[in-house]
Amino acid sequence: MHKFDTKVQLLKYKVLREVARLSWEDDLLENVTEIPKIIVPGKVPTMRCCVYKERAILSERVKLAIGGNKHNKKVIEVIDIACEDCPAGGYEVTSACRGCLAHRCEEACKKGAISFDRTQKAYIDKTKCVECGACAKACPYSAIFNFKRPCEQSCKVKAISVGKEKEAVIDHEKCTACGACVDACPFGAVTDRSYILDVIDLILKAERGGGKVYALIAPAIAGQFAYASLGQIVSAMRALGFCGVVEVARGADRVAWEEAKELQEKGKLISSCCPAFVTYVEKNFPQLTTYISRNLSPAGTIAREIKAREPSARTVFIGPCTAKKAEFQRPEYKGLIDSVLTFEELQALIDSRGIEVEDLAPTELADASPYGRRFARSGGVAEAVSAALKEQKSDLVLDAAVCSGIEECRQALLRMSKGALPQNFIEGMACVGGCVGGAGCLRHGAAATAEVERYGAAAGGTILSHTQK
């Protein structure tokens, strides 16, 4: 039984699996409209008010699963018709209101939005309310609460608002494609577009003699597939048609080595490993972009190495990160990473080809140092750069601001912008906990982090020894 954290993930997986299955069989074009009926057969609804609404939403999911509008390069999208059951949000008076005599909420409101019913319970007039929160702060019973939608609450860059039809709206000028809203939405109304068909096309062309396709696996893969060993998942990727499976942790070792040298050169440095964090810096602290490491991310670094050795090769990054789907479209990554899959999509791809993972003999990997593998969790980059400095016999001591989640990143960047950051290195991770908290993960939390630690401990050698491979 495959392990998914939520039923939303399971539904997404079913759509991806069917799209991929039909694509392998070259039947997608003729049967794409039948996928909603395959997933929701009969006339009894399982998720919504009726099967027709369910199928209409599934049709929209199918569109994103096959890549969506090719002219729209945005990674995160809202399925409008699936976004309807969340409250509009804002400040509301709860049943905790005692109808007191003081009426401090009324006095605090400068817009006259507070009134009272016959029982003296407070009421907020939404046509007057400006969502300042003064009434909530004034209430002695904490009876006024700010009801934010899960997607809004999860988005720390304030890129999500409520539209005219009460649907979620994404401001792509602010969005970093981190996928926090995707993970947070209980209805799966916010989702990421898929490039799974592009990956299938690459594999099929390779099988017809069109070169080699390499899978680049992020170190966060450790422990993601609870029903099988990592070695069996590697074997499954080979069975899918990837000619080789390469650890991105190898690229992490190289990045740590180069960032250690760059830190000595600049004196202060911002890590370039997390694409959502890099985008956040560029959009919100453009004056600090000169401090961003000139190194590509670990995935880009290892892809460049493969392409230098085999120019005709194709590379597919497989990891927990929706922001990677935006990163590989950036000019500096052009021609290096050919496509991106999340762990969710990898599971769908494996099952679409009928591969029995549990029956496969494991293929072991030994391509990276413990430090490179621990890039997957918060603090891992800083530890690797510190180790690299020591291996380079540098007198510089790393003093890192390790930032887990955008809120911590913002605080460090604010201090840096004002010349008040005592640390000489910022490790920024947009997802709380690091890559193990990514929206494309099958498993989140402490268990996933513990598996990454074990994965790292199983590696051998130093950063230097692995950069020389």
Image: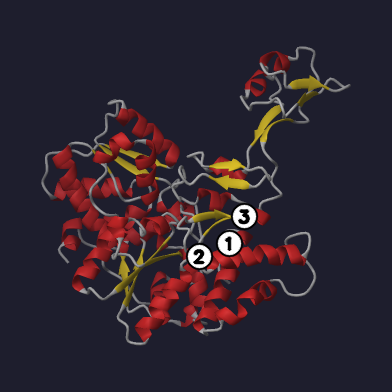
Q: Are marks 2 and 3 in contact (CB under 8 Å)?
A: no
At mark 3, the secondary structure is loop
Residue 238 percent location from the top left of the image:
38, 79
Q: Which residue in the protein does label 3 denote?
A: 189
Callout 3: 10 Å neighbours few (<14), some, many (20+)? many
* Amino acid found under the numbered disc labelled 2: Glu
Q: Which residue in the protein does label 1 denote?
A: 9
Q: Are marks 1 and 2 in contact (CB under 8 Å)?
A: yes
Q: Quadrant of residue 30?
A: bottom right
User: With respect to residue 354, does 144 lie above or below?
Assistant: above
- Residue at figure coordinates x 58%, y 61% from the top left: 9
Sequence-earlier tag: 1 or 3: 1
* Amino acid found under the numbered disc labelled 3: Ala
Q: CA distance from mark 1 to mark 3?
A: 12 Å
Q: Which residue in the protein does label 2 denote?
A: 344
Residue 180 percent location from the top left of the image:
51, 49
| Badge nearest the viewer, 2 or 3 | 3
- Residue at figure coordinates x 80%, y 69% from the top left: 44
Residue 278 percent location from the top left of the image:
35, 46
- Residue at figure coordinates x 45%, y 56% from the top left: 322
At mark 1, the secondary structure is helix
